[in-house]
Image (cartoon, rainbow, N blue to C red):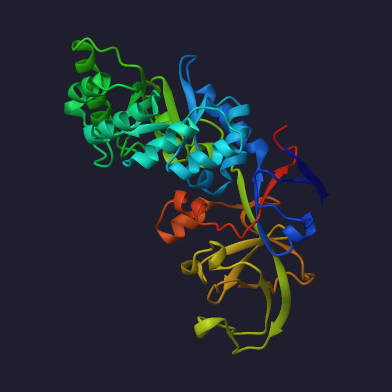
């Protein structure tokens, strides 16, 4: 894995060529307009913190679906595995293939449902591990694998209250017995997913846990020794060790964000992603001047504004227009006017020495101030998961090592 290094203001930037879109341009070109920084040290730290919560018999599965929540799946997968994760979870066949093509050999669990012989053949070829949710799926997998004369590890999912993928938990015994009878299927785990693990009220989570336990007890009563079991997502991993079982599947916490405010004391997590852009022009406008489409902002006095090269096509929600702040030179300044496809405007009247090329931090830390994906999510009435996943690939991902966590 080749790396290019550049020192800028005491920070080491690494463009990992096998992980990110290839470019013949240097770092100054990559970071001329806007970019996403991924702190590798923070990611390793978070893996270590999560592992401290687990017993020696419980392994960490790193959830790297949706391009590792926008962080870059290949790079995140490598770092998480090096830091002690046992395997990886993705949502789609294409995501699993991408990791295999990058040379990653760790177990990869496909969380989504695959239903066609073509998908089964690809899964077998790339040595991925699928989720089986229905008897029909199991039949398709078994019949296709019999043609290939290949045995495949499969993971059986039970629906204990999420009402999404999975067999009803009450039918666990019949489902497992069926899969055990089918040739070329090797049950690798049985699992379920929690709907409200991030809620301060544990009632529903406990009900789902109870249902999962009852399903496993039914299997044991039928003489079936369950293989690996897993139930916990990030929130459940932080909330209750009784939910850990053999694996935990950590996503959001891996990237340094807490699934809920009441879980902040469980471990110390560090945000992995920062989003930055540059000032492309500075100008002064007189009172009464409108700014951007629709004149949603009209200056009530002489105002110094900065134009910044990032917009909603990059993943900054347009609904944040006139509602967000950014950081420049360790100061907080407000965004004004409608956020456009490629640009936004800031009121920088308080920063007299601001020049073109200045770095603007949209998400991250500058001096003693910070802005998080949680802040954006709260303003928009959504969740931080959506914010992280929204940043588009025209923003280069640049790996950062700043020694903060060394």
Residue at (59, 90) in percent of width and height: 288
Which image quadrant: the N terminus? Answer: top right
Most foreground residue, 82 or 290: 82
- Residue 137 falls left or right of residue 345: left
Which residue is at 54% across, 72% downward?
A: 339
Q: Is residue 157 visible?
A: no
Q: Is residue 37 left or right of residue 232?
A: right
Which of these two is toward me, 386 or 327?
A: 386
Counting from the top left corner in percent of width and height, residue 232 is at: 38, 30
The answer to whether residue 300 is above or below residue 71 is below
How far from the left and from the top, in percent, is residue 67?
Answer: 53, 46
Image quadrant in which you'd find residue 77: top right
Total marks in image? 0
The answer to which image quadrant residue 298 occupies is bottom right
Residue ranking furthest to the front:
147
Residue 61 x %, y %: 48, 29
User: Residue at the location (47% across, 45% down)?
Assistant: 94
From the viewer's perspective, is 343 left or right of 241?
right
Q: What percent of the width, then of the height, locates residue 23? A: 72, 55
**Which sits in the foreground, 218 or 199?**
218
Where residue 106 sits, quadrant-wise, is top right
Residue 231 visible? The answer is yes
Q: Quadrant of the C terminus?
A: top right
155 to 226, vertically: above or below? below
Residue for point 59% across, 83% down: 299
């Amino acid at each position: 894995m080749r790396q290019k290094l550049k020192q800028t203001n005491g920070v080491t930037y690494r463009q990992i060529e096998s992980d990110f879109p290839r470019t013949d341009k240097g770092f100054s070109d990559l970071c001329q307009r806007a970019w996403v920084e991924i702190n590798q040290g923070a990611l390793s730290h978070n893996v270590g913190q999560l592992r401290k919560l687990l017993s020696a018999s419980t392994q960490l599965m790193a959830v790297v679906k949706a391009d590792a929540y926008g962080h870059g799946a290949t790079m995140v997968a490598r770092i998480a595995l090096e830091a002690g994760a046992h395997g990886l979870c993705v949502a789609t066949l294409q995501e699993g293939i991408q990791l295999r093509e990058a040379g990653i050999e760790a177990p990869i669990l496909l969380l989504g449902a695959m239903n066609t012989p073509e998908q089964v053949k690809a899964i077998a070829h790339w040595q991925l591990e699928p989720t089986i949710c229905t008897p029909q799926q199991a039949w398709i997998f078994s019949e296709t694998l019999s043609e290939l004369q290949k045995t495949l590890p499969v993971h059986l999912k039970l629906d204990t209250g999420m009402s999404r993928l999975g067999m009803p938990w009450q039918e666990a015994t019949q489902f497992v017995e069926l899969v055990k009878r089918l040739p070329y299927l090797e049950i690798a785990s049985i699992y379920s997913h929690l709907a409200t693990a991030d809620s301060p009220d544990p009632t529903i989570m406990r009900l789902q846990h109870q249902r999962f336990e009852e399903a496993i007890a039914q299997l044991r009563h039928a003489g079936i020794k369950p293989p690996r079991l897993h139930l916990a997502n990030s929130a459940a991993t932080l909330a209750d060790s009784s939910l850990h079982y053999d694996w935990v599947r950590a996503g959001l916490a891996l990237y340094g964000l807490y699934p809920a405010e009441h879980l902040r004391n469980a471990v110390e997590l560090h945000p992995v992603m920062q989003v930055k852009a540059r000032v492309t022009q500075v100008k002064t406008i007189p009172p009464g001047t409108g700014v951007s489409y629709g004149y949603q902002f009209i200056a009530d006095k002489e105002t110094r504004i900065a134009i910044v090269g990032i917009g909603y096509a990059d993943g900054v929600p347009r609904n944040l227009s006139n509602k967000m702040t950014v950081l420049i030179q360790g100061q907080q300044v407000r965004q004004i006017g409608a956020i456009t496809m490629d640009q936004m405007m800031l009121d920088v009247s308080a920063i007299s020495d601001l020049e073109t090329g200045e770095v603007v931090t949209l998400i991250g830390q500058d001096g003693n101030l910070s802005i998080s994906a949680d802040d954006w999510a709260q303003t928009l009435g959504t969740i931080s998961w959506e914010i992280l996943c929204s940043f588009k690939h025209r923003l280069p991902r640049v790996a950062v090592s700043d020694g903060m966590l060394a």
